[in-house]
Image (cartoon, rainbow, N blue to C red):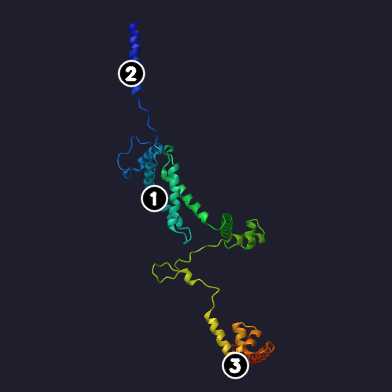
Amino acid sequence: MSGTKTKKTTAAAPKAAAKATAKPAPKKGASKKAWSGPIEECPTEELWGEYARARDSKKPEALERVRNVLMERHYPLVKYIAERLLQTLPKSIELDDLISAGLFGLMDAIRGFDPERGIKFKTYCTTRIRGSILDQLRSQDWVPRLVRLKASKIDKTLQRLTAEYGREPTHSELAEALELTHSELAIEIGKATAKSMYSLSDRWEDRDDDSSLEKVDVLEDKKSIDPTDVINKSDLMTYMTRSLTHKERFIIEQYYRVGHTMREIGEMLSLTESRVCQIHTNVMNRLKEQLDGKTGTLLS
């Protein structure tokens, strides 16, 4: 009996020793041991293990240091995505603004990435970076999103009908394809015509030298007075009043050029308002007779 018990004890001893020496399996996606060198020299694959350890240790300084290294490693990707999007945007959009918005998307991607899922971080963060840039552009767009969608729908229908007919469709054909009436289509086209905004500091020509004008330099000032028009009116006034007396010329100039009333002109000349009106009527009749004789000339 004693020999049997000894055999059972001897057979169970290796199993107990194996259980005692067994180590817990490392977590999937985590490094076997911490990086001992400077964190800036750590390979990108092992950085995620350092990031997970820094997050579990609840040390904000260590977590921020690893996150900054990850952002520096993936900054070229943010710049690449921003440059690709910039090619489809107006010139008023700055590349630095797109990169800044993309960096916020990269920070969110680093914060929400889980290496244990077996997905490459580049694939995961590309969508987040692009989405962050587009969200920033939509927030700055002064045209409502619904207007943009209507404009895109009308443009796609117009291109499809042009390809089918081999010509640009008529207004009625476009309205029928969109299931709208003529008046409704006209209203939708007016609403969907999104205006573009440009920076007045942009160069008129794509040159770096100072000889290129800015758009603000060629902007029309509709409130300004055309000097040529002023000179022409002055010359015409001088030509028409050259046969008048000093008093008659003064009344015409003060009434038409300066804008004074008959009463104010009468006070200047020490005349009654009715007398000024009488002189004005006589002068206008004489000038009318002179112009009637100029038929076929530049003054007609």
Mark carried by residue 246 = 3
Whichever of callouts 3 and 2 sits on the residue coming sooner in the sequence is 2
Residue 175 lies, in percent from the top left, at 64, 59
Of residue 106 and residue 3, the one placed in the foreground of this image is 106
Mark 2 lies on a secondary structure that is: helix
Residue 81 appears left or right of 164: left
Three-letter amino acid code of the residue under disc 2: Pro
Answer whether residue 124 is visible to the viewer in this image: no
Whichever of callouts 1 and 2 sits on the residue coming sooner in the sequence is 2
Quick one: quadrant of the N terminus?
Answer: top left
Residue 22 lies, in percent from the top left, at 35, 25
Residue 168 appears left or right of 66: right
Q: Nearer the viewer, mark 3 or mark 2?
A: 3
Q: Splitting the image into 4 quarters, where does residue 62 fall?
A: top left
Mark 1 lies on a secondary structure that is: helix
Residue shown at 43% from the left, 47% from the top: 106
Residue 237 lies, in percent from the top left, at 58, 87
The residue beneath circle 2 is: 14
Whichever of callouts 3 and 1 sits on the residue coming sooner in the sequence is 1
> Is residue 161 shown above or below 288?
above
> Is residue 283 shown above or below 122?
below
Three-letter amino acid code of the residue under disc 3: His
Mark carried by residue 75 = 1
Residue shown at 40% from the left, 50% from the top: 77
C-alpha gap between disc 3 and disc 1: 81 Å
Residue shown at 36% from the left, 41% from the top: 47
Q: Residue furthest left?
A: 37
> Is residue 46 shown above or below 193?
above
C-alpha gap between disc 3 and disc 2: 134 Å
Of residue 58 and residue 31, the one placed in the foreground of this image is 58
